[in-house]
Image (cartoon, rainbow, N blue to C red):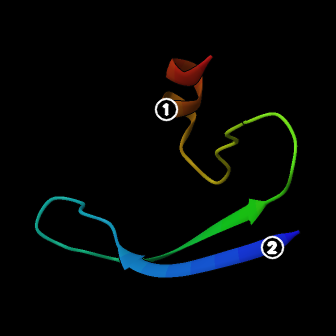
Amino acid sequence: MSLAIVHSRAQVGVVAPAVTVEAHLTNGLPALTLVGFCRKVRLANE
């Protein structure tokens, strides 16, 4: 098990708020889970 943390910036119009991206790396089937995003994006993901 490994945890990777990356500090980056998100583009929101003309501002760029700081964001932290965390990735948990394990053996097994590939999967992607997004957490902490708005409801409109969540509905589009389903």
In the rendered image of this protein, does residue 17 appear above or below residue 27? below
The quadrant of the rendering that contains the N terminus is bottom right
Q: Residue at x 62, y 79 (%)?
A: 5
- Image coordinates of residue 31 in percent, x first then y, are 73, 36
How many angstroms separate mark 2 from mark 1 (CA)?
27 Å
Looking at the rendered structure, the kind of residue marked 1 is Val
Q: Front-most of 32 and 45?
A: 32
- Image coordinates of residue 9 in percent, x first then y, are 33, 75
Q: How many marks?
A: 2
Q: Quadrant of residue 3?
A: bottom right
Q: Quadrant of residue 14?
A: bottom left
2 or 1: tag closer to the N-terminus: 2
- Image coordinates of residue 45 in percent, x first then y, are 56, 23
Q: Is residue 2 left or right of residue 12?
A: right
Q: Quadrant of residue 13?
A: bottom left
Label 1 Cα neighbours within 10 Å, binned few <14 / some 14-19 / many ≥20: few
- Image coordinates of residue 23 in percent, x first then y, are 67, 64
Looking at the rendered structure, the kind of residue marked 2 is Ser
Q: Point out which mark residue 13 bears.
A: none
- Is disc 2 placed on a helix, strand or loop? strand
Q: Point out which mark residue 41 bears.
A: 1
Q: Residue at x 73, y 36 (%)?
A: 30
Q: Front-most of 28 and 21?
A: 28
The quadrant of the rendering that contains the C terminus is top right
Q: Residue at x 19, y 73 (%)?
A: 15
Q: Front-most of 19 and 22?
A: 22
Q: Is residue 26 left or right of residue 5?
A: right
Name the mark nearer the viewer: 2 or 1.
Answer: 2
Q: Residue furthest front?
A: 27
Q: Which residue is mark 2?
A: 2
